[in-house]
Image (cartoon, grey):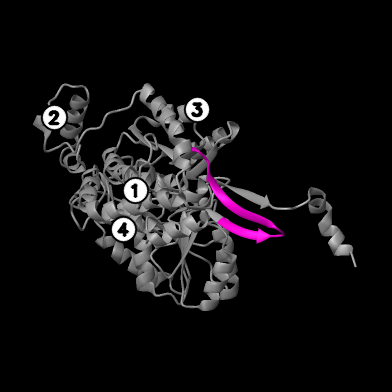
């Protein structure tokens, strides 16, 4: 069903949806409400998808890297050609139009010549030494199973098929809650590009199904090599252990609890803009800022600017070009976070109400008002849940540390960022080059650091996803799926080398006359 129809009349739309699913209504009578329909895979289809991927793996991996890289070029070209259709479908499924446009722009950076070209350069390096031809190469792991999230499934699915370029075959599960954007992306953007370069049948396999049974099949199947999972921390870390127990590589994209630091000399208007990105999509985007550390000297001024911007961010139907908030269906947890923060000394600067689609306050609204909390003191701020954990709501806690000399404060702030149990992105706003240098040299937490820049903006070459701690699991890092789904192998081809000389000759040369 279109999100607009659900927002207009939840009961009527969901009742009609259930009737359609049970075959008790005619789609023709619901043309204004229905985006489209998608088959749900049975168990046999799930198994066949895995078998098809395994059957195509050797032939696809054997195609030259230069041929496989043309796949990225073909997807990029089709994104340019079909972006308007793609955005219309994402909007109908519930993504605010501005954020759908942001996702498409980000995908164009992910599939850019610069980003994919850099990844391709990492795939093989050649050397000559001591009568030997040597090279280091990255080989595909085999069959990669991809599980995109419910909150941004289509763009995550396109990100998840990047292992194709390094020679892996892919099995992808579209979520039942929003399958159409995924299916459009695969059928209209990826499939024609695969056919264009002569990829074998089975290179890409896509179906819609419930996650639980599919993940269990992937874990049990000896034909699946890697599982690329995007979702919640608890299930993701459990899956990591289950993968390791059966010898599979887990690639995790879990939660983020990103920290944004505003130093005393920052451009406060620009920093406030970056902070306000936390409200986009009602905070239901893993890479938005989740907490702010504000230098005590500018905290009051910064909060005033953030409050003013929060007041301008409003709900609306997804196709409203000014709407940036998305509905939040399970909002009770949001109010638990607010109550917990208030009970531990925080104050509400703005927000903490439910809103109707038109922006009016309501006890039954499906939207949440952008909410700003002030928390004084760095020492105990992580006792507050909204600081310690990812909230996934339009909620930003602004922590104001105690007033201490700047050199000491910078040490405390950097230690605080590095001790975060999450590690997706971190940002800094300052005009002081010394502070920038210290921050870049010492912050090890996170897959991406941004300095005086949009927190969520995409850039060529730079990773868009990936991180440390609870964000990426034990093996988390900046995520380039084309590289993460490969393994490094060294090759040495000798000519005229005597084995015994190769073993003992180096030390003899070192100690000889």
Count of numbered marks: 4
Q: Earlier in the sequence, mark 3 or mark 1?
A: 1
- In the structure shown, which secondary structural element does the residue marked by tag 1 occupy? helix
Rounded to the nearest angstrom, the CA distance separating label 2 from label 3 is: 38 Å
Q: Earlier in the sequence, mark 1 or mark 2?
A: 2
Span shown in magenta = 125-144
- In the structure shown, which secondary structural element does the residue marked by tag 3 occupy? loop
Residue where numbered disc 1 is placed: 155
- Where the C terminus falls, by quadrant? bottom right
- In the structure shown, which secondary structural element does the residue marked by tag 4 occupy? helix
Residue at 18% across, 25% down: 19
Residue where numbered disc 3 is placed: 221
Q: Residue 161: x percent and y percent?
A: 40, 44
Residue where numbered disc 2 is placed: 27
Residue where numbered disc 4 is placed: 105
Residue furthest front in the image: 496
Which one is closest to the eye, mark 3 or mark 1?
Answer: 3
């Amino acid at each position: 069903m279109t999100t607009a129809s659900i927002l207009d009349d939840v009961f009527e739309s969901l009742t009609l949806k259930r009737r359609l699913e049970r075959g008790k209504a005619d789609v023709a009578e619901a043309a204004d409400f229905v985006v489209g329909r998608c088959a749900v895979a049975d168990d046999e289809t799930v198994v066949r998808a895995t078998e098809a991927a395994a059957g195509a793996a050797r032939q696809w991996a054997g195609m030259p890297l230069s041929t496989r890289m043309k796949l990225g070029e073909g997807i990029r070209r089709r994104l340019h050609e079909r972006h308007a259709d793609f955005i219309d479908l994402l909007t109908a499924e519930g993504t605010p139009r501005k954020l759908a446009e942001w996702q498409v722009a980000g995908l164009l950076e992910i599939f850019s010549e610069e980003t994919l070209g850099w990844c391709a350069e990492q795939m093989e390096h050649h050397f000559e030494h001591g009568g030997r031809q040597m090279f280091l190469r990255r080989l595909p792991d085999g069959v990669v199973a991809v599980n995109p999230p419910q909150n941004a499934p289509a763009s995550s699915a396109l990100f998840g098929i990047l292992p194709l370029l390094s020679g892996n075959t892919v099995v992808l599960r579209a979520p039942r809650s929003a399958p159409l954007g995924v299916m459009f992306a695969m059928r209209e953007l990826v499939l024609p590009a695969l056919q264009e370069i002569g990829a074998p049948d089975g290179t890409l396999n896509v179906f819609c199904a419930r996650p639980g049974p599919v993940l269990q099949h992937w874990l049990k199947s000896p034909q699946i090599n890697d599982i690329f999972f995007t979702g919640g921390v608890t299930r993701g870390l459990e899956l990591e252990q289950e993968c390791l127990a059966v010898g599979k590589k887990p690639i995790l994209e879990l939660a983020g609890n990103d920290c944004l630091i505003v130093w005393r000399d920052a451009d406060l208007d620009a920093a406030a803009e970056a902070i306000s990105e936390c409200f986009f999509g009602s905070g239901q985007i893993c890479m938005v800022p989740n907490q702010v550390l504000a230098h005590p000297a500018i905290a009051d001024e910064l909060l005033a600017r953030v409050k003013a911007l929060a007041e301008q961010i409003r709900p609306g139907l997804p196709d409203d070009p000014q709407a940036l908030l998305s509905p939040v269906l399970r909002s009770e947890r949001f109010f638990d976070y607010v109550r917990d923060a208030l009970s531990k000394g925080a104050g509400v600067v703005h927000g903490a109400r439910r809103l109707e689609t038109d922006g009016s306050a309501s006890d039954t609204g499906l939207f949440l008002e952008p909410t700003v909390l002030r928390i004084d003191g760095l020492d105990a701020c992580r006792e507050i849940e909204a600081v310690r954990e990812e909230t996934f709501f339009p909620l930003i806690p602004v922590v104001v540390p105690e007033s201490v000399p700047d050199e000491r404060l910078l040490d405390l702030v950097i230690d605080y960022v590095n001790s975060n149990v999450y590690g997706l992105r971190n940002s800094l706003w300052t005009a002081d080059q010394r502070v920038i240098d210290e921050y870049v040299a010492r912050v090890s937490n996170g897959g991406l650091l941004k300095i005086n820049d949009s927190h969520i903006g995409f850039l060529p070459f730079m990773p868009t996803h990936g991180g440390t701690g609870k964000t990426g699991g034990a093996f988390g890092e900046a995520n380039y799926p084309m590289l993460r789904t490969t393994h490094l192998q060294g090759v040495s081809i000798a000519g005229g080398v005597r084995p015994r000389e190769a073993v003992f000759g180096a030390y003899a040369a070192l100690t000889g006359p």
